[in-house]
Image: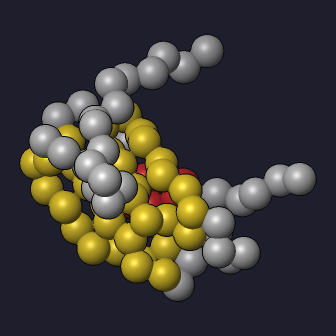
Amino acid sequence: MPTRGPTPEGDETGGTTDLAETTPVTINGRPATLDRAEEVWVVNGGRLPDGSAFRLTVPRSFTADQVLQLARSVRRTK
């Protein structure tokens, strides 16, 4: 079973604090940010095709491209 790393604290806007870098990205045709913290990547502002919001936290052992591929593959199940 995978282990969880620390999750950076968010501010009231859903942003991530204590960042090394923030990059604007597009997820499912909508704006989001790819945030790099010391131990994790965070996709903030991700939206599914139905408009549902999500926040994805991934270990830094992933590459930025892998994080974006994963964020773009997120689907909602019923």
**Residue occupying image coordinates x 37% and y 23%:** 5
Q: How many marks?
A: 0
Q: Is residue 72 visible?
A: no
Residue drawn at 32 percent across, 66 percent down:
33
Q: Nearer the viewer, residue 35 or 10?
A: 10
Q: Which part of the image, by quadrant, shows the N terminus?
A: top right
| Viewer-proximal residue among 34 and 17 | 17
Residue 28 placed where, x, y %? 57, 77
Q: Residue furthest right?
A: 78
Give the colour scheme shown: secondary structure
Q: Is residue 39 left or right of residue 76?
A: left
Image coordinates for residue 62, horizontal then vertical, percent? 37, 42
Q: Position of residue 76 (x, y in %)?
A: 76, 57
Task: Give residue 24's quadrant in the image.
Answer: bottom left
User: How far across and down, in percent of the image, does residue 23 sit?
Assistant: 22, 67
Q: Say which quarter of the image contains residue 57.
A: top left
Q: Residue furthest front?
A: 12
**Please, is residue 49 above or below residue 7 in the view?**
below
Q: Is residue 35 left or right of residue 46?
A: left
The structure residue drawn at horizontal position 64% and vertical position 57%, both measured from the top left corner, is: 74
Q: Is residue 26 left or right of residue 41?
A: right
Let me know if residue 16 appears in the view.
Answer: yes
Q: Residue at x 48, y 52 (%)?
A: 55
| For residue 45, above or below residue 4 | below
